[in-house]
Amino acid sequence: MQRGSASLIDHLATVRTDSLVREPERLDAAFGETDGNGLADATASAGDHDNLTFYVHKGFASSDAGFRSFGQCPCLLQSKPRFRGVVFLDGLLFGKHDSAVSSCLVRRGTMSFHSKDSREPLSVIAAAFDQFEVRDLTHILEEGIPYFPTHGRFYHLDASRSDDPAVMFQILMHEHNGTHVDAPAHFMSGVPDSDHDFLHSVPPDKLIGPAAVIDVSKNPPHLLTVESLLKWEKANGAIEPGEAVIFNFGWHRKWRTGIEGKAFVEQWPGVDRGVAKCLLDRRVRAVGTDCLGLDCSGSAENPAHDCLLRNGILIMENMAALDGLPQRVFLIAAPLKIRGGSGSPIRAIALVPKAVENGR
């Protein structure tokens, strides 16, 4: 290994972020002795530093050699990296390599910035978004949609007035109509905490981040067990802390309005307590399903709601258009900020890399 690579590892493993930012000359010294191959060597030899963060400055990574080094760093770019992330200093831009590098790092959620020009980080993010297809995972809200037997229906009522030229409608609905999210207060054995368990207190980034998509739609069981979950992880990689998990039972295909939607509310599948406990152990941020509930129909104990919601893990239900998603996507879902809300409709979307979307 080159001397610069060893120096780089020493700096990244032992020096705090704030001191690096305050003392950029130390950063320059570390990277100044390291070419593109040196960075690849450094990452390959950093097995003892599982929480390593790379600090990259513009002069190094904007060069062709610097870009190639990212391509040679499987620890940074694969689905299961050993490294905590990449921090770009001095408003780093990759020039002609903007999209390829930034989209990969944004998809993995490993990019952050220290820049005097606030426009530069935004331009990198804009370039990254150009590398994604946006998939809508939300059912249309309209009268006649399926609803839980003990919940109210959705109504869209004409609210136009003769003394106002605007076209207006009034919405009358249950919090848990359509594609929606359950807040912790929705299902708790004790008294909900008004400052933490209702929807108005849920952080807005709770439903933004990487998500694992578990597709069991070819042969959906009525009750998914932890054995099936572990089998999926063996084939697709472990579910990481902070990821959301979305189950595709193929149930979204049954979504219809009126009498044709009756099949959607009958005998829907769900997950057992073992799956819920496993996801709790994985420290996921949210769990979604395309069914009417995450617990299967007829469940008396509702183990998934009990285990997840009382531990602050949100549940998304009635998700749509899950077929054809890759095993990993970037999820963005926005609930309404309802004070005292036990749930809310959401507009859920998945960002899918175009390379995956086009089958490359």
Image (cartoon, helix red, strand yellow):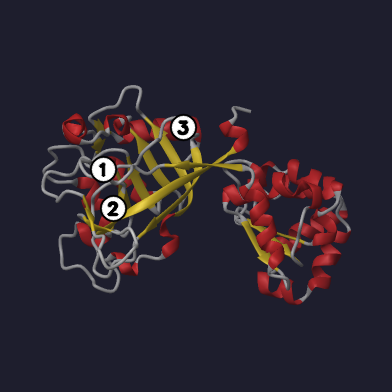
Residue 55 appears in which quarter of the rendering? bottom right
Residue 115: give x, y in percent of width and height.
Answer: 72, 69
Q: Few, some or many C-alpha atoms within 10 Å of disc 2 (few <14, some 14-19, many ≥20)?
A: many
Mark 1 or 2: the one toward you: 1
- Point 22% across, 62% down: residue: 185
Label 2 and label 3: CA atoms lie apart by 23 Å
Mark 3 or mark 1, which has the lower sequence index?
3
Q: Residue furthest front?
A: 162
Q: Residue furthest bottom?
A: 22
Label 1 and label 2: CA atoms lie apart by 10 Å
* Side of 35 where 237 appears, left or right: left
Q: Is residue 228 above or below residue 27?
A: above
Give the residue type at disc 3.
Lys
Q: Secondary structure at mark 1?
A: loop
Q: Nearer the viewer, residue 203 or 191?
A: 203
Residue position marked by numbered label 1 in the rendering: 294
Q: Nearer the viewer, residue 56 or 329?
A: 329
Residue position marked by numbered label 3 in the rendering: 234
Contact check, label 3 and label 1, Cβ < 8 Å:
no
Mark 2 or mark 3, which has the lower sequence index?
3
Residue position marked by numbered label 2 in the rendering: 308
Contact check, label 1 and label 2, Cβ < 8 Å:
yes
Q: Secondary structure at mark 3?
A: helix
Residue 301: give x, y in percent of width and height.
Answer: 14, 46
Residue 287: give x, y in percent of width and height.
Answer: 35, 47
Give the residue type at disc 1.
Leu
Give the residue type at disc 2.
Leu
Label of residue 19 in the image:
none
Mark 2 or 3: the one toward you: 2
